[in-house]
Amino acid sequence: MKKYRFPLETVLRVRRIEEDRVKAELLLANRAVTSAQYSVERRTTHLAAVPPAPSGSSLEFMRGRSRQMQAAASLGHARGVLSQREELAAERRTEWTGARSRVTSLERLDDRLRSEHAIEAGREEQRLVDDLVSARFARRGADA
């Protein structure tokens, strides 16, 4: 019997490459989420550290208030970026899950076909042994 070869081997190889590509994109997206989370934390700390607007002159009050508003706007922007990156990471995770399931299903099919091939090879080997034993038995019967 000839050696086992998975008929969809090329498809499986392509699916694995696709899975690796999507997995790399997911890792990059997760890294971007972590970076955005760090940015939000830094800006939150900065906003908390901005002193309240002094109640002295109106110019000092406006400067202090401007610093507070800039820090708050920066925090708001960082939260928006974080939200976008989390959405992208969720999309990448969904893509990776789909790619992984496609690879897994092909691997299961390969395993099943490999098992069937092994069973058939065992049967063929058993038939060959049976034929040899029968032939020897027939020769001994003819010699006697």
Image (cartoon, helix red, strand yellow):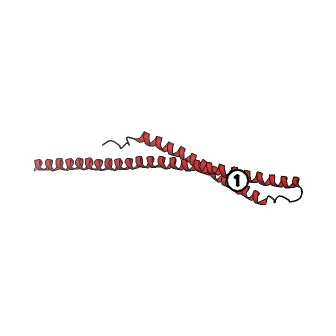
Which secondary structure, mark 1? helix
- Percent coordinates x, y for residue 96 in the rendering: 51, 48
Residue drawn at the location 84% of the way across and 53% of the way down: 62
Near mark 1 (Cα within 10 A), the count class, few <14, some 14-19 or many ≥20, is: some
Classify residue 74 as left or right of residue 104: right
- Percent coordinates x, y for residue 116 in the rendering: 31, 49
| Residue 49 picture quarter | bottom right
Please name whichever residue, 33 or 113, is drawn nearer the observer in this view of the structure. Answer: 33
Q: Is residue 100 shown above or below 51?
A: above
Please name whichever residue, 138 or 103, is drawn nearer the observer in this view of the structure. Answer: 103
- Percent coordinates x, y for residue 101 in the rendering: 45, 49
Please name whichever residue, 73 or 5, is drawn nearer the observer in this view of the structure. Answer: 73
Classify residue 129 as left or right of residue 9: left
Residue drawn at the location 48% of the way across and 46% of the way down: 99
Please name whichever residue, 19 or 94, is drawn nearer the observer in this view of the structure. Answer: 94
Tell which residue pokes out farthest to the right in this image.
57
Residue drawn at the location 50% of the way across and 42% of the way down: 18
Residue drawn at the location 76% of the way across and 53% of the way down: 71
Amino acid beneath label 1: Ser
Task: Read off the residue under disc 1.
Answer: 39
For residue 64, say whether it is visible: yes
Q: How many marks?
A: 1
Classify residue 62 as left or right of residue 74: right
